[in-house]
Image (cartoon, rainbow, N blue to C red):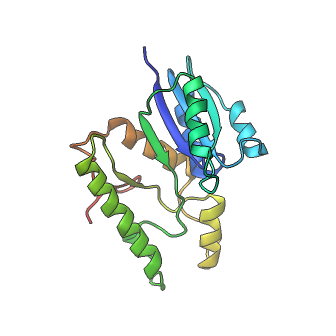
């Protein structure tokens, strides 16, 4: 049986690490953890995560500011027998809640950037032979999410990272181009119309 190949970027902490943990624990998965410093303690700690039957972890260096990193990453993956990727998880943790729960504060740049991401994803889904959709993980109790909460006078964010990660994996596992493609999904509220 061919393994499911999952690529995650920035996955050595927070929600990304939670997603790596869930996919790595599944049987027959190759999980690629791409980050800027594979030698960091947080990157090395990924090797200690539980691994499902016939699953494996591959940690690669990818730093967008280093011109040669992408080519080196492809060579490294090729040496591990990786010739395609089934699931790409570009994790971006947000400082504020999902679109429906935006606080009444000045955040025009934040909202504009999210609208651009949603529009781009909708176009990618329509124009490419892949399933592309956006998942809002919720306002998670990560280092970044809690920093945002403190900025707004709260002790911490709202959503447990493990709950968010489980919700994201559940969405990804059932997604098809027709059912999920080009749409915005929230791990707690389901389909968000925008």
Residue 139 at x, y percent in the picture = 51, 62
Asked if 84 appears above or below 39 in the picture, the reply is: above
Asked if 162 appears above or below 153 in the picture, the reply is: above
Residue 103, can we see it? Answer: no
Q: Quadrant of the C terminus?
A: bottom left
Q: Seen from this angle, which residue lies furthest top?
A: 1
**Front residue of 54 and 26:** 54
Residue in view at x 30 percent, y 52 percent: 124
**Front residue of 65 and 142:** 65
Displayed quadrant of residue 150: bottom right
**Front residue of 93 and 90:** 90
Residue 139, can we see it? Answer: yes
- Image position of 117 (left or right of 68): left
Number of marks in picture = 0
**Front residue of 150 and 132:** 132
Residue in view at x 42 percent, y 66 percent: 98
Residue 90 at x, y percent in the picture = 49, 50
Residue in view at x 64 percent, y 38 percent: 60
Residue 1 at x, y percent in the picture = 42, 14
Residue 63 at x, y percent in the picture = 63, 51
Asked if 147 appears above or below 122 in the picture, the reply is: below
Residue in view at x 33 percent, y 60 percent: 120
């Amino acid at each position: 049986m061919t393994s499911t190949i999952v690529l995650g970027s920035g996955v050595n902490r927070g929600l990304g690490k939670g997603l790596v943990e869930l996919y790595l624990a599944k049987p027959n998965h190759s999980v690629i953890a791409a980050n800027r410093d594979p030698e960091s303690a947080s990157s090395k700690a990924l090797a200690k995560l539980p691994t499902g039957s016939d699953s494996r972890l591959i940690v690669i260096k990818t730093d967008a500011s280093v011109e040669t990193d992408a080519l080196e990453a492809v060579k490294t993956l090729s040496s591990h027998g990786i010739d395609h990727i089934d699931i790409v998880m570009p994790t971006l943790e947000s400082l504020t809640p999902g679109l429906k729960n935006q606080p009444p504060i000045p955040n025009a740049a934040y909202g504009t950037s999210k609208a651009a991401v949603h529009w781009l994803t909708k176009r990618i889904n329509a124009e490419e032979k892949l399933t592309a959709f956006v998942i809002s993980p919720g306002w998670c109790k990560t280092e970044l999410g809690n920093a945002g909460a403190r900025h707004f006078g709260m002790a911490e964010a709202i959503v447990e990272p493990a709950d968010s990660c489980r919700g994201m994996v559940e969405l990804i596992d059932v997604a098809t181009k027709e059912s999920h493609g080009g749409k915005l999904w929230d791990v707690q509220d389901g389909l968000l119309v925008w």
